Image: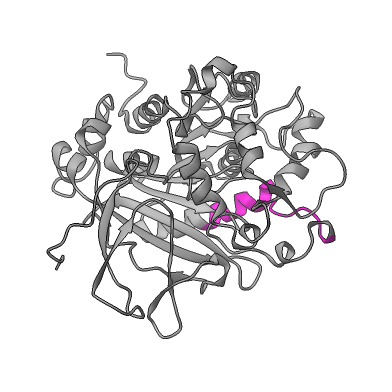
Amino acid sequence: MRPPLRCGRRRAGLKLMWVKRLPNNSGSGYRCELDEQPHVAHVTSNGLNERKNKPEEAMSDQKLQPHAQQRVGLSRRHLVGAAAVGLAIAAFPAGTLPSIAATSSSQLETEEFRLPWSEPGVDIYVRNKRPAGIQQFPADRILLYVHGATYPASTALDLPLSGMSAMDYLAGLGFDVYLVDLPGYGLSGRPAAMSAPAADNAPFMRTPDAAKVVGQVVDFITKRRGVEKIDLMGWSWGTSTMGLYTSTHNEKVNRLVLYAPQWLSRTPSLIGGEGPLGAYRSVSRDSAKDRWLKGVAQDKQADLIPQGWFEQWADATFATDADGAKLSPPVLRAPNGIVADSKEYWQSGKPQYDPGDIRVPVLVIHAEWDADLPSYQAQEYFTKLTHTPYKRFVELGEGTHTVMMEKNRMQFLHAVGAFLTEADPQALD
């Protein structure tokens, strides 16, 4: 029962909410918490929930308790423009999903899981968000998202900008949404190579390794929900991960969203640099901001990222690397597997996989100021999708590689939502 006190005022667009104290905490039964940064409740050997700063210390292969029970759902204004919502709701069996109005104002439920990885003691972090009270979803209303080369999924897809994350938006459309942080990233465990100097070990988490992790998570989700296939979405290097996986597992994929796809490069990479590659690289907040705004005209930079959004993202993202946070200045460490792949394949004129082997519907979505993977890569990739039932290319104006967290993010979310929810895109009338 919620105590008869107010949690406090809203600050910087962030929601305050009541959550129960964990069993091993002292004090009153409730505390006030800002819903702004990811945290994780770990299952300990005695069955109690415990918060820890290092994600790699979690017990593997354990289901985590639902985060804060339930999170507040979307306001109606966040769904304006998503005309496909009615189709999304209609896809559910009668009586299993609330009406459109109820969905837009209902609560969302979040669960967290840890799956074992090939290296003992290192786990894979998976987060699920869905309309509260719903346990069964049709296969085409289940979505898995994977991140790119440097930053995790948990602080991008589920970052509550102005009180709403992209994950919230998609769950508000009636989706059972999952994200995964690959080992070495975000809230997943850190392999032993990251405890040694970078130069002591070779790059790890190559694209086939990432695709194997995705396959493990897909199998976990399909078994959990009793379906044979789901939707996939990847950002940046994540498009190579999802593209490679789909090209060899078409039977497990409904539709595929490729956000800023990677293809053969004619321009220098913005990550990795020159010289020998170690196991991982380190990124500072300043370099992250510089890379984000690379190529954006000076007079367009001021209002591209709404006030406070970069800081909110950077605070959440850099906090996921406990060891990097101890350095001065703090850094975020990221595996170099993608950099090795980029040098060996994409920057050497050799595709790492054939997009022509993808045989499911595909959305390629991109923004015009993307300096990481420029428009020519997305355009050329699109032409290689020769065996899809149908495909779509969307180029958004006034956006960068990180348009999902910029002023035009709702255009991005509307386009993704419409693609995933349309019932019959090839209908003649």
- For image coordinates 59% across by 24% down, the residue present is 370
The overriding secondary structure of the stretch rendered in magenta is helix
Whether residue 184 is situated above or below residue 240 in the rendered picture? below
- Name the quarter where the N terminus is drawn: bottom left
Q: Position of residue 420 (x, y in %)?
A: 37, 33
Residue lying farthest to the right in this orientation: 275
Q: In this orientation, does residue 111 appear? A: yes
Whether residue 137 is situated above or below residue 428 in the rendered picture? below
Left/right of residue 333 with respect to residue 171 in the rendered view:
right
Q: Position of residue 374 (x, y in %)?
A: 64, 22
- For image coordinates 36% across by 80% down, the residue present is 24
The stretch of residues the image draws in magenta is 200-216
Q: In this orientation, does residue 135 appear? A: no
- Name the quarter where the C terminus is drawn: top left
Q: Position of residue 276 (x, y in %)?
A: 87, 47
Left/right of residue 68 with respect to residue 400 in the rendered view:
left
Residue lying farthest to the bottom in this orientation: 46
- For image coordinates 71% across by 62% down, the residue present is 194
Comparing 338 with 299, the one in front is 299
Q: Position of residue 269 (x, y in %)?
A: 74, 31
Is 143 a magenta residue?
no
